[in-house]
Structures are given as C-alpha cells and as structure tokens.
Image (tube, rainbow, N blue to C red):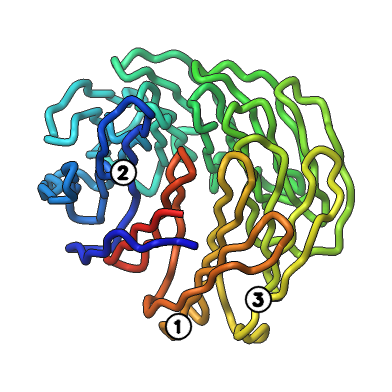
Amino acid sequence: MPVKLWHTTLDAPIVKVSWHTISKNRKKIFPVKSILTKKSVYLLSDNASATKREIPEHYESITISDNGSLMAGFKKNSIDLFTTDYQVLKHIQLNEAPSFLLSEHLSYSLSPDGLYIVIVSWFLKHIYIYDASGNLLAKHAISDLRGARVKFSKNGNYLLIHVPNWGTGNTHGYILYMDRKGKILWHKDHDGCQAQFDISYSGHHAVMFSEGTICAMNHQGEVIYEHKTDIDIFNIALSGNAKFLLMSQSKQPMLSCINNDNGALLWTHNLENVNSSSQFTISLDVPHNGNFYIACISKDWNNKINNNQCYIFNPEGKKIWQNSYNHSQLFVQLSDCGKFFVLIGDNQIYLYRI
C-alpha cells in the first residue's frame, strides 16, 4: 500500500515535477529534485527543504527536463536554455520568426535527460531539433502543425510527434517517429485527426488509438497488432517495458488493460462513485514492469466540484487502494524507478512511496 511521505502547498498551480535518479550505491536522498509551478521553480534538498526561485518576468512560458538538469523558456521570438538558477547556457534565435511571434504560436519539449529540445511551430510551419549546446540538428517543413504534440521515450533516444493535420479537406492525421537527433525513421497515418498515443521507455514500441482502432508498432514501424474496438478511449498509458496498455474511456468511468503483445483484453474495471453523466478527466500512469496501475479521476471540472479520486490496481485489475482529494483537477506522475509517485492537485503536491 502507498505510504504518504510528504505534502506541501506552493505559490501557484504545479506544471511539472523532476526526479532524482535513484541508484543502489547512492546515499538516501529525497526523490523529488525540483517542482515547476507557473510562477517559480522549487529546488528540493535531501531533507525536502525547498529553495524557491521565481521565474523571470520576461519569459512567456517555461519548462524543465524530467531529470531537472535543464530548463527552457520562450521570450519574443527566441528560446533560452538555462540552469535552475537561470544562468543562460544557450540562446536559440528563431531567425525565421517575426518579432510578434507569441508563445501560443509554438510548443517546445526537452528530452528527459535534458540533452535535446524539440520546437514545434504551426505558425512557422516547421519542426526544429536542437541539442543542449544550441546546435540545430534537424529541421522539417510541415504545412499544418496546429495541435501537434510531442512525447519522448523515457531514455530520451526516440520521440513521437502526433500531427492532427487539420488542413482543408484533410481527414487523416499521422505520427512521426524520430531519433533524438531529429531523423524521421517512419510515419503512420490514421483515420480522423485526433489520436491518443504513447511510447515505451526504450522507444522501441509505440501505440496509437484513433477512430476506434488501436495500433501497436515496433521501432521499425512494423505493425504488431491493429484492431477495432468499441471502447471509446479518452487516455492511454503504456508500461515502460511495452507489455501492458492501460486505457480510460471518455464517456464512462471505466478502465481497461490489454496485453500489448497481441492486443488481447486482460481486464476491465468500473470506477465506483463516479456519475457517468458528469464531465470528468482521467490521468493515468504505469510503472516500467506493469506491476500496478494508477488512475486519477477529476470530476465536473467545469463546475469545480472538488471531490476527486486516486485508484491503484494490481496486475489482475483488482483495486488495492483508493483515496479522495479536494482539488479541481488531479494528476499523477510516477518516478522513473517506479517506487514513488506524486499526486498534483492545483498548487498542492503529495509524495507517496509504493
């Protein structure tokens, strides 16, 4: 059962948590390395004391790598790469960008190890990949990047970019599979423009759901399985070893788990005390070996009904833990080692050991 280790309230809604790398030879440390809010970054010591550093006002948006080694911030038509004390390491000038380029005109993602940054701009109609030294490694011209999303593999070696492809008359989106230097290794089209997708820890497996079809692929783009389902999927989470796929439904408070080797359904579980007629969102996470599953459900977000639940299931789909939280939305994030997780609700964070 989970054991709560720590709980605190910060200055603004929490955006992301970075983790220490836990090794057998390393002394006992506090697992959370840093916490990024919309106003500040908090650096945690070994005894969980926090050093707060407010985000400089000239940055319109900011992010941090999973390991907390690098941060990135957008200002005007450029992106800075910097340390957690805001020492600028590299300045990436988007030379093709007009002076009025805004943060909503692009998105950017750091690799988990902080060695690479991917910039996707629907306004500039390009994808850019830079290393942490500011060197441009790849540049891809794509006509419609509105709503494109990026996911890195946890080891940082591969990434998926989903492109809805909303251009006039288009009814098919696609995913691009790249190595960390931006080389496109393969792409796959799908029916419809929207899709849910995920990538394994090694990046050697990818999975995608769109228009009632689940498709799993290996790192060569070969289809492992592809079949229709009547499950209306809202969100998916792939275990790090790519053996299990956890799915939540969009219209019913229900979770399903499938064997990702062949797409066979393993179990389905109805989430009790959730009104299926109400609006809700579900945050999912699965550890590397799939030995448990975490789901957080946020109900009636538009009405701000703060009665949300976190569930943990064993590999057979049996609920082994449940707890309630009074936040407008609730999200879960697992540590890479799978021994810890945080629950994020508005500007509060809960750390558990499992």
Q: Would you name the residue on which mark 3 appears?
A: 271
Q: Is residue 129 left or right of residue 289?
A: left
Q: Would you name the residue on which mark 2 appears?
A: 31
- Please determine whether, in this image, residue 305 is positioned above or below residue 336: below
Disc 1 versus disc 2: nearer the observer: 2
State the separation of the CA atoms marked 3 and 2.
30 Å
Q: Amino acid at mark 3?
A: Leu
Q: Quadrant of residue 275?
A: bottom right
Name the secondary structure under disc 2: loop
Near-viewer residue (291 or 55): 291
Measured from the top left, where is residue 73 in percent x and y? Answer: 25, 38
Q: Would you name the residue on which mark 1 appears?
A: 307
At horizontal 23% and vertical 30% (from top left) the residue drawn is: 80
Disc 3 versus disc 2: nearer the observer: 2
Name the secondary structure under disc 3: loop
Q: Amino acid at mark 1?
A: Asn
